[in-house]
Structures are given as C-alpha cells and as structure tokens.
Amino acid sequence: MLEAGDDAPAITATNQDGETLTLDFATPTVLYFYPRDDTPGCTVEAKGFNAELDAYREAGVSVYGVSTDDADSHREFCDAYGLEFDLLADPDGDVAAAFDVDTSRGAAERVTFVLADGEVRAVYGGVTPEGHAEEVLEDVRRSGLLAEE
C-alpha cells in the first residue's frame, strides 16, 4: 500500500453519474476505499463523510469514495442516502491497484488516503467507520496542509 511521502498516482474513473473523472491530487483530497455499497459499515462511513462534507469543502478538501462496485450501484447508493460527493467505480480494481489497495477478497479493503500536491500525505488503515470522517477532517486541519481558515 502507498505510504505517506509516496507520489500519488493520477487516476481516471467513472463516477455514479457515468462521468469520467481524472484526478491528479494537486489539491487537498480525501480518497477513501470501502468494500461494498449499501452494507452497514460502508453506509456509516459514507454518511459520516456526507455529514462533514460542508466542513471539508470549506477547508478546500475534496472527498471521493472508491469501491469495486459499478456506477449503477454507486448511483443507487448515493440516491438512497443523499450522498453529495462522488463515488468512483472501480470494478476492474485499477484505481485500487494504483494505490496498492488489496482487492484479493473481491472487494477493496477499507483504507483512506489524504493527498495533496501530487503526494500521499497520510494513510489510515484498519478504519473504524463510525467517526472516521470527523477524525480525518480534524487531522487534516491540524496537519498544516490547509491555509488558515
């Protein structure tokens, strides 16, 4: 798995609306990998990021979720829970492979990356979904990565 200090790979993926996005992580970004749409832990985690989304945006941080589910599944997940950030479809595991995230069990492991200036700034493995979005936001604020608010 990529570690803090590693170069962040540029990626291209399709979001829940079928739009192709190319991300180079020049600006502060949280990219979190999760196993499956609409499962208990993944729903808690997604709802947590959605609840904190205004605070992330005010801090100038983009948020993206990634799983091996397809765009249709992501759209249904977003619609069911009112998610207002992009979920990236990675059915072939290409995005996960770029970050060296394990998909050997048929789904991405739960891990979060904080990226900026084309570099991995922080990695959270062994994530507990409850409270994770708040923890990452607080860490990003304390890290000095952001301009003073």
Image: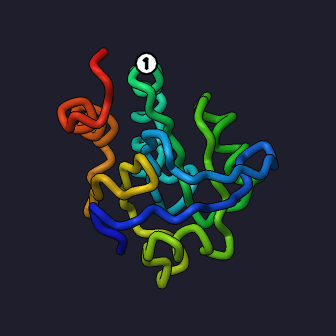
Compared to residue 18, the image places residue 60 above or below, namely: above
Compared to residue 115, the image places residue 1 above or below, namely: below
Q: Nearer the viewer, residue 43 or 19?
A: 19
Q: Residue furthest right?
A: 18
Q: Secondary structure at mark 1?
A: helix
**How far across and down, in percent of the image, does residue 98 sit?**
52, 73
**How far across and down, in percent of the image, does residue 119 sit?**
39, 57
Q: Is residue 143 left or right of residue 94?
A: left
Compared to residue 16, the image places residue 60 above or below, namely: above
Q: Is residue 38 left or right of residue 100?
A: right
Q: Nearer the viewer, residue 4 or 136?
A: 4
Q: Nearer the viewer, residue 107 or 18?
A: 18
Say how the picture is coloured. rainbow
Which quadrant would residue 13 be assigned to in this image?
Answer: bottom right
Q: Where's the C terminus, which quadrant?
A: top left
Residue at numbered disc 1: 58
For the residue marked with disc 1, what is the amino acid?
Glu
Q: Residue furthest left?
A: 142
Q: Where's the N terminus, which quadrant?
A: bottom left
Q: Nearer the viewer, residue 141 or 78?
A: 141
Residue drawn at the location 44% of the way across and 76% of the way down: 100
Residue drawn at the location 29% of the way across and 62% of the way down: 5
**How far across and down, in percent of the image, does residue 110 sit?**
38, 62
Residue drawn at the location 34% of the way across and 37% of the way down: 133
Q: Is residue 120 left or right of residue 10?
A: left
> For the residue carrying disc 1, how many other residues have a C-alpha within 10 Å: few (<14), some (14-19), or many (20+)?
few
Which quadrant would residue 3 be assigned to in this image?
Answer: bottom left
Q: Is residue 143 left or right of residue 121?
A: left
Q: How many marks?
A: 1
**How far across and down, in percent of the image, does residue 18 sit?**
81, 49
Compared to residue 100, the image places residue 19 above or below, namely: above
